[in-house]
Structure formats: structure tokens, C-alpha cells
Amino acid sequence: MDRKKFLSVTGLLTAATSIEGFAPGDKALNKFIVPPYLKPGDTIGITSPAGYISLEAIQPAKLLMEQWGFKVQVGETIGKRSYTFGGTDAERKADLQAMMDDPSLSAIMCARGGYGLVRIIDDLDFSRLRKNPKWIIGFSDVTILHSHLHQFVDMASLHSKMCNSFPDVWALAEPIQVETINSIHAALTGSKMKYEASYIKYNRMGTGRGMLIGGNLSILETLSGTASAMDTRGKILFLEDTGEYLYSIDRMLWNLKRSGMLSGLEGMIIGNFKTKADDPEEAFGKTIYEIVLEKVQDYGFPVCFDFPVGHQRSNFALKCGVMHELRVFSAGTQLLALA
């Protein structure tokens, strides 16, 4: 991957804080929570609320987080299996619930994605999490949690790689693996994140400012019309996906447009989309760039493509529910977290 991108980190915040940048009386100013940032000695729980993962597979992540100075608590679902899932629905729900309720934990890392959170999301109780907020970490299927936390709990969370993406041998890891995993540590400890990506000719110029929200496109489409669907107005939306045909991406983006999720945005970030090859006899005829630009042509917000987020090694940690500024201009793209 030759497009330029880097992470710069400045500042350290150590307490829960309200989001900046809203007028007095705005709902977000009064309600939205950024969990306390982590310090050495804090504890991170590891659970698997979706797919199965072995105890052995989480060891590289556990070891590195301990080297960062954190304690690690391994959940009951790690190593459990019920077909494709990390335990039964009841077991996965109980493990995640226990970690959300545990005041000794400062963060919860989902061990992997896959499928399963939608089966338990409505049975979870978030009342204690509101009183003792903590960072919930993951992506892909964990988009369900990010969306639900944003809309239902009014709490920020961290979209990032999970345990199954940590390299087995840190010393042999590629530089991009090191950068992206270190971005998790930077985000959790309160650094103000800044990312840059190279100019793409399909980008639409402009500047937008708002809470950063988003995740996996197919998950967000699935949540449309549910209690977990996000209010996107005044926000910056990022999207990624993998293993979909171009026509499926087109259909899902039409869903977002028709349901009003694209109107009122402050900006849009398109990450990595790994698509399936079309049948030559039924080629869709549009690129991902054309598909997206068609859906946003009625709106004036900036749009950037090929941002380093998604099902790829270049998948940096993004603070969902935190104010960001998106700048798309002729020299490239900048995304700056404001807290």
C-alpha cells in the first residue's frame, strides 16, 4: 500500500469528559460520555461476544497489553465454542454483561468479530455501564455495539483491530501492523489522534466537523429501523466492508440514503472495501467510487476514499462518538480527533 498515512499523538486526558463543540443545551453536551482514558495498572477484559476464538489465539494480544502496563482479565467465553460462536447466546451475553458491570475493568476488548452480537444485543443491560463507563473495543460485527452504544447509551467507543489481528511474533511484525496496533494504545491512553491519507482523484473537497461514527456497512444496514440505528445528523460517517459484491454495496448504500442516514452528514469517510469479483455475464458496471458518489450527489459534505480503516492490515483505531474534524483537500485527507 503506497498511500501516505501517519498517526500523530498529543496530549493525555485521564478523566471522563463531555464532547466539545456543541451549543449549550444540546443533548450531546449533557448526555454523551467519553469513558476515562487508561493509565498503567488499569485492567482490560477480553471477551468473545461473536465468533469462537481459542485461548492460545489471544495470547499475543494479552502479552502486548501487559507490556503496555495493563492488567488483562480473560473472559469465560475465550476457548468456549458453540458451532461458529464463542459459546452459546446465554454464555456470550453473560460474559459481556459481567464485564460491562465490573467496576474494576477500564476497557473491554472483543477478541474477534464474525457473527453473533445481534443475537444478544437486546438482552444486555447497560445501566451499570452508564454509571461506570469503559472503552469497548473492536470492529466488524462489533459495529453493532458501537452503534448501540452511540444511540442507546450515549457513550464513546473504540473501533479498532481485535485480538485475532495481533501478530504472533511482535519482532517480526510488518511496520503497518505495529502502527495500527500501537494506535489502540494511543487512543486508549488519551492521545489526540491525527491521520492523513494521500489524495484520491475521486475525493470531494471540503471540511466537516462532528462526532465520528460508523463501521461495517452491512451491519449498519442491518440495524436500520432498530433501536440500535444511529442518528447520523451533524456527524462524520465512516464505512468499510469485506466480501460483498458491488451490487450489494450499491443496495446497502441506497438503504442508507433512503432511510435518511446520508442527509445532514458533516462528512463521509470510505475505508477499505474488499469486493467479490462479479460474474462477467452480470457485471455491475460501477466502481466503489462511482457507487458512493452517486449516493451523495445531492449533498455538499466532503468525501474521502481509501482511508486506512477496514478489513486489512491498515486498520487504525478510531474513537467513535468523539468530536473530529475532517479536512479533504488537494494535498490529501486529514482526520483529527478533538478529544
Image (cartoon, rainbow, N blue to C red):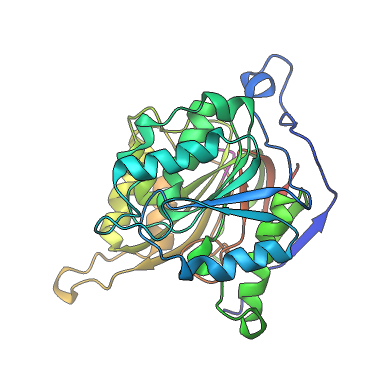
> Relative to 199, is 67 on the left or the right?
right
Question: Residue 102, how many percent across, how many down?
Answer: 58, 36
Q: Is residue 19 above or below residue 70?
A: above
Q: Does 198 lie within the magenta span?
A: no
- Stretch in magenta: 263-267
Please give the name of the residue rendered at 72% of the width and 38% of the height, measured from the top-left corner: 36
Expressed as whole percent of the image width and height from the top left, the position of residue 266 reads: 59, 39
For residue 196, say whether it is visible. no
Is 79 in front, or is 20?
Answer: 79
State the count of labels: 0
Left or right: 125 in relation to 188: left
The secondary structure making up most of the magenta span is loop
Q: Residue furthest bottom?
A: 172
Which quarter of the rendering shows the C terminus? top right
Horizontal and vertical percent position of residue 285: 27, 66
Q: Quadrant of the N terminus?
A: bottom right
Q: Residue furthest left?
A: 281
246 left or right of 48 in image: left
Residue shown at 51%/68% (left/top)?
165
Q: Nearer the viewer, residue 186 or 72?
A: 72
Residue 190 against residue 2 in the figure, above or below: above
Query: Which picture quadrant has residue 79?
Result: bottom left
| Residue at 69% in and 62% down | 66
Whether residue 127 appears in this view of the structure is yes
Identify the residue at image location x=48%, y=54%.
139
- Residue furthest to the right in view is 11
